[in-house]
Image (cartoon, rainbow, N blue to C red):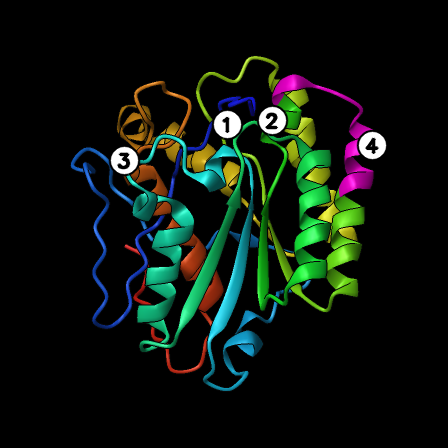
Amino acid sequence: MRNRLRTAFACAFALLSLPGLTLSPANASEFICKSASIVTAAASPDFAALWRQGDGPLRLLAIGSSSTEGIGASARDRTYPARLAALLRQGLSGRAVEIVNAGIGGEIAPQTLARLKKALAQARYDLVIWQVGTNDAVTGGDLKAFRGLLADGIAAARQAQTRLAILDPQFYPGIKETARYRAYVDAIAETARANGVPVLSRFAAMSGWYQRDAEGFMAALAGDRFHMSDAGYACLAQDIARSLLERAPGVALATAR
């Protein structure tokens, strides 16, 4: 059986506000999202070019561990990939958007990398969101090898001529080896920057939100205080959507509140 190593994934995340779009996190009465883009990169990624490629269907791949699979969500349609697909359809005026959820709880980077390469060889995707690093940081390992795996995955996406965004590890209150954990977060940022790949930095967003309102932050977590709740997944999807759509033609994003 697959090892369901619990990947912590909460959210300090922002409501995406688009004309005619309303998506409120379930069970989120104590959890308030504030608008923000969570994308970081050495050079600003031109996601807008992706939406300008005609009006045909868009196919995205969300690959990673339990954060992507949706452990802690009450239903499959409450995972972040499912919610993100709905937000992108609305933000792009009903354009067909499919997000393949290839999350497997408990995976570490070498396992996900192997699946990523296989997926890129078997099908064409307009964008891949690679969630990576949490389980590696929790269990420890060779940080130099981890950097090499990241670079390998970036090269594979580039060879497949597929846009890639990396979703970095989450912040959660139970982090024990904080220096080691942060080293993995930094390794992702540095490797991505060196290769011109955008990072969706949930670690930075969540850390700041937790510092502002630790009690409210806990409502974004599932009962194990490790995985995300429905509210947390909804907010993650909203911030990723904002990051992807903020410069899309014909999409007006509301000013952060």
Horizontally, residue 107 falls left or right of residue 79, namely right
> Is residue 37 visible to us here?
yes
Horizontal and vertical percent for residue 144? 83, 31
Tell me the quarter of the picture where residue 246 sits.
bottom left
Query: Residue at coordinates 46% horizontally, 59% vertically from top-left?
Result: 99
Contact? badges 2 and 1 (CB < 8 Å): yes
In the displayed structure, 195 sits above or below 88; it is above
Contact? badges 4 and 1 (CB < 8 Å): no
Q: Quadrant of the C terminus?
A: bottom left
Bounds of the magenta span? 138-149
Task: Give the crowd class for mark 4: few <14, some 14-19, many >=20 residues within 10 Å.
Answer: few
Among the two numbered marks 4 and 1 on one chain, the one whose residue lies closer to the N terminus: 1
> Type of residue at label 4?
Ala
Residue wearing tag 2:
135
- Give me the disc on residue 204: none
Residue wearing tag 1:
7
| Numbered disc 3: secondary structure | loop
Residue wearing tag 4:
145
- Give me the disc on residue 74: 3
